[in-house]
Image (cartoon, rainbow, N blue to C red):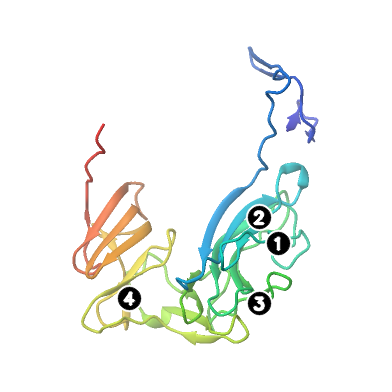
C-alpha cells in the first residue's frame, strides 16, 4: 500500500493492514479486517505482456514476459516465465536492476519476444524500461541472449537504421529469427523495399546477416502484418515497393491478421488518423482494398 498524507510524501507499507480508513472530501470509507480464516493472500503484482513459442510444431518451448518493478515493495520484478520442449515449467528468468537490459530504477517489461528454433537457450526481446522522476528517458531496443539469460547483447540493426527508433518486431521461423526494422511513417504511402530491412540469425545469435522483404510470387499481392502498433504493408510487384494497407484512404493497425489465399481479415482494427475502431476488416484482393465487416451479435 502507498499511503500519502497531505504533502508528506508516499510511505510504503508492505505489511498487511488490519484496518484502514479513507477520507475524501465529505465521504469516508472504513474497511475492517476479514474474520479469521477468510483472508487470503493477494497474488503478486505483475502484468503478463508478450508471449512466444518455438516455431517448431514438435516443440512446446514457450516464454512469457511479466512486467514488474525493481522495487520489491511494489510487487514482482520483471521476468520471463519459461517452459521446456516437453511443456514443463523452468525456473523463471528474473531481470536484475543493474543488468544489461534494464539498468535503472523503475518499472520494466518486454515490448516483443521471440524464441529460436536452433538453440533453446537463445531468447530475443525488446527491452521496455520506464524511467521515473528526473531520470533521462531510455528508448526500447532489441536484445538477445545465447546462454539462457546470463549474458545479453543488442541485436545489430542494418546499416543506417536506428535500433531504438526503427525496430518493428521479431519473426521466428524454422530457419531462424529475423529482427525487422522500418524507415518510414504512415505519412509516406508507398516506399521502396530498402526501407524495410532485417537482421537474420540462423545460429542462435552468433552471426547475423542482412535480409529484405520478399513475396512468394511476383503476380500475387502479398501482405505483412508488422504488429498491432505498426500496421500492415502490402506489395503488388513482388516486394520491390510497399504500401500501407488503408481503409478509406487511412492506414490502420490491427491486433491480428488472418489469411486464406488472397482473402484477408484484420481483427480489432483501428485507423491511425481517426479514433474509430472496427472489430473486423476484410480484403478479397490480397490487401489492396479493405471494407468493414459487421459481424452479427452472438445469440442472447
Label ID, residue 108: 2
Q: Residue at x 28, y 61 (%)?
A: 246
Dot 1 or dot 2, earlier in sequence: 1
Dot 1 or dot 4, earlier in sequence: 1
Mark 3: few/some/many CA within 10 Å (<14, 14-19, 20+): many
**Residue 260 spot, x, y in % from top left:** 25, 66
Q: Which label sits in the foreground, 1 or 3?
A: 3
Label ID, residue 242: 4
Dot 2 or dot 4, earlier in sequence: 2
Q: Is residue 294 above or below residue 96?
A: above
**Residue 129 spot, x, y in % from top left:** 65, 58
Foreground pick, 233 / 18: 18
Q: Is residue 264 visible?
A: yes
Foreground pick, 127 / 207: 207
Q: Residue at x 69, y 75 (%)?
A: 147
Q: Are marks 4 and 3 in contact (CB under 8 Å)?
A: no
Farthest residue, direction top: 26
Tell me the quarter of the image containing the C terminus. top left
Amino acid at each position: 500500500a502507498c499511503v500519502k498524507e497531505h504533502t508528506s510524501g508516499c510511505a510504503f507499507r508492505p505489511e498487511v493492514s488490519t484496518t484502514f480508513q479513507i477520507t475524501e472530501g465529505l465521504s469516508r470509507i472504513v474497511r475492517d479486517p476479514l474474520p479469521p480464516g477468510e483472508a487470503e493472500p493477494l497474488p503478486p503484482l505483475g502484468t503478463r505482456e508478450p508471449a512466444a513459442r518455438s516455431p517448431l510444431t514438435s516443440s512446446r518451448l514457450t516464454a512469457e514476459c511479466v512486467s514488474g518493478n525493481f522495487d520489491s515493495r511494489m510487487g514482482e520484478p520483471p521476468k520471463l516465465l519459461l517452459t521446456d520442449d516437453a511443456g514443463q515449467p523452468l525456473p523463471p528468468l528474473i531481470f536484475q536492476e543493474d543488468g544489461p537490459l534494464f539498468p535503472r530504477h523503475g518499472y520494466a517489461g518486454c515490448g516483443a519476444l521471440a524464441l529460436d528454433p536452433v538453440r533453446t537457450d537463445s531468447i530475443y526481446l525488446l527491452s521496455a524500461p520506464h524511467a521515473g522522476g528526473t531520470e533521462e528517458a531510455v528508448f526500447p531496443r532489441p536484445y538477445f541472449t545465447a546462454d539462457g539469460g546470463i549474458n545479453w547483447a543488442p541485436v545489430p540493426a542494418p546499416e543506417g537504421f536506428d535500433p531504438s527508433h526503427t525496430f518493428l518486431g521479431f519473426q521466428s521461423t524454422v530457419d531462424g529469427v529475423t529482427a525487422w526494422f522500418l524507415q518510414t511513417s504512415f505519412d509516406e504511402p508507398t516506399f521502396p523495399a530498402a526501407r524495410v530491412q532485417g537482421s537474420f540469425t540462423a545460429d542462435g545469435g552468433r552471426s547475423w546477416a542482412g535480409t529484405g522483404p520478399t513475396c512468394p510470387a511476383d503476380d500475387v499481392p502479398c501482405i505483412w502484418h508488422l504488429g498491432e502498433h505498426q500496421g500492415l504493408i502490402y506489395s503488388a510487384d513482388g516486394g520491390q515497393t510497399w504500401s500501407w494497407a488503408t481503409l478509406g484512404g487511412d492506414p490502420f493497425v490491427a491486433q491480428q491478421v488472418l489469411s486464406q489465399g488472397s482473402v484477408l481479415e484484420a481483427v480489432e482494427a483501428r485507423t491511425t488518423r481517426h479514433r474509430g475502431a472496427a472489430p473486423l476488416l476484410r480484403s478479397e484482393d490480397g490487401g489492396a482494398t479493405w471494407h468493414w465487416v459487421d459481424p452479427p451479435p452472438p445469440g442472447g
